Amino acid sequence: MTTKVFVDGQEGTTGLRLLDYLSARSDVELLRIDDDKRKDPAERGRFLNAADVAFLCLPDAASREAVSLVNNPNTCIIDASTAFRTDDGWAYGLPELVRGQRERIRASKRIAVPGCHASAFILAVRPLVDAGVLPPDYPLSAFSLTGYSGGGKKMIAEFEAGGNPRLESPRPYAMGLEHKHLPEMRVQSRLAQAPVFSPVVGNFFKGLAVTVPLHVNQLAKRVTLADIRAIYASHYAGEQFIRVAPDDGPEQLDNGFFDVQANNDTNRADLFAFGNGERIVLMARLDNLGKGAAGAAVQCMNVHIGADEATSLAA
Ligand SMILES: NC(=O)C1=CN([C@@H]2O[C@H](COP(=O)(O)OP(=O)(O)OC[C@H]3O[C@@H](n4cnc5c(N)ncnc54)[C@H](OP(=O)(O)O)[C@@H]3O)[C@@H](O)[C@H]2O)C=CC1
Ligand SMILES: CC(=O)N[C@@H](CCC(=O)OP(=O)(O)O)C(=O)O
């Protein structure tokens, strides 16, 4: 039996990537809207209601509109936008979050795909909160290094047009400390307050790494780097898309340098703990268009329809 799939936002960065993943699949029938009607709400509504799975790869407002157009109770919506990620009526689309999350994704007809920075942050932080190491009221901060494809078509065009020397060096942004991923970071990590979060976009297409600094003497209990790696290994035991770095050796660091792009073209997230025993940084790395967006959306569909979770995805 094939699954009828519609991608609303098929011409955008995430939408095009999703179509790449899906077009090779024999278990999926892609419903394609005519290009000149792709922003026509009536036509979108027809396609959304004809789909078993509808991916929304749209700005938040257009996602909300798409949801309002769906009246078929069988249509499962998998939304890549920020609109519903902390909404109780939606399953958070991170199957590895905690035991039981896959069942939520399987059972729900409304699935919100996590933000790219948020995915990395939550994967690094949530296990330590659940293990009682990181107090929920710890004053966390974090920064993220990301490729420019995270900014969608507009930012890609700016970087690729060339001729702007200001885009050559890394650019910190969201300086008002109100980045749109803060609510999901707080809620899905079970923190009392949002972190001070500073993203930095660099002159490379894709790849993302979030860094979370910790003072060991401020934690609820003293832990070593090995303890943190063991907590990760236990939390993510059996997870094919999560890799826990076992040490800080040359496999993890290239002459002491960290490679932000090493997970590109995979759906994998790598987790690290570095430091000197007193001062620690947690790091999580992923492809912002893979596990950070389209890969995660496909993984959610695989879980929801009961397909092999790795179909179309590289670990
Ligand atoms: N890029 C990334 O790394 C990630 C993005 N996301 C999220 O995914 C969503 C899409 O992002 P991204 O692909 O980067 O964005 P893009 O700007 O690349 O693409 C958005 C697409 O939506 C189309 N669109 C806009 N309004 C409407 C409408 N009313 N009806 C139908 N189509 C519409 C746009 O059309 P047009 O081509 O005419 O502009 C465009 O093709 C966003 O919510 C974003 O937050 C999530 C995770 C990561
Ligand atoms: C470089 C850049 O601008 N990145 C985007 C994040 C893209 C993403 O994953 O977030 P959403 O799914 O919430 O869009 C940003 O920081 O807003």
Image: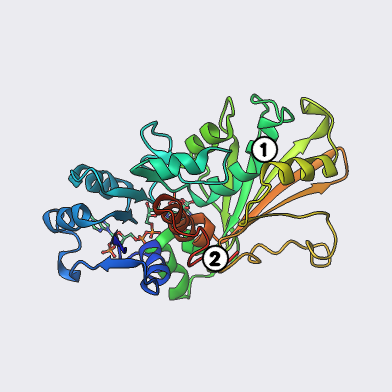
Task: Give percent across and percent down for residue 182.
Answer: 51, 38
Q: What element does badge 1 sit on?
A: helix
Q: Which mark is residue 206?
A: 2
Read off the residue under disc 1.
127
Residue depicted at x 68% and y 41%: 235
Q: Which mark is residue 265?
A: none
Taking depth in this image into account, of 303 and 230 the one nearest to the observer is 303
239 over 89 or under it: above or below = below
Q: Quadrant where the N terminus lies?
A: bottom left
Taking depth in this image into account, of 216 and 156 the one nearest to the observer is 216
Task: Give percent across and percent down for residue 73.
Answer: 23, 42
Task: Give percent across and percent down for residue 214.
Answer: 75, 37
Residue depicted at x 47% and y 41%: 103
Pick out the residue farthest to the front.
Answer: 1
Q: What element does badge 2 sit on?
A: loop
Q: Residues within 10 Å of mark 1 (few under 14, many from 20)?
A: many
168 over 108 or under it: above or below = below
Taking depth in this image into account, of 260 and 309 the one nearest to the observer is 309
On screen, residue 43 versus residue 81, left or right, reads left
Please state which amino acid type lies under the numbered disc 2: Lys
On screen, residue 42 versus residue 213, left or right, reads left
Disc 1 to disc 2, C-alpha distance = 26 Å
Question: Disc 2 beta carbon < 8 A from ligand 1?
Answer: yes
Task: Give percent across and percent down for residue 106.
Answer: 42, 45
On screen, residue 119 versus residue 245, left or right, reads left
90 over 256 or under it: above or below = above
Residue depicted at x 46% and y 46%: 93
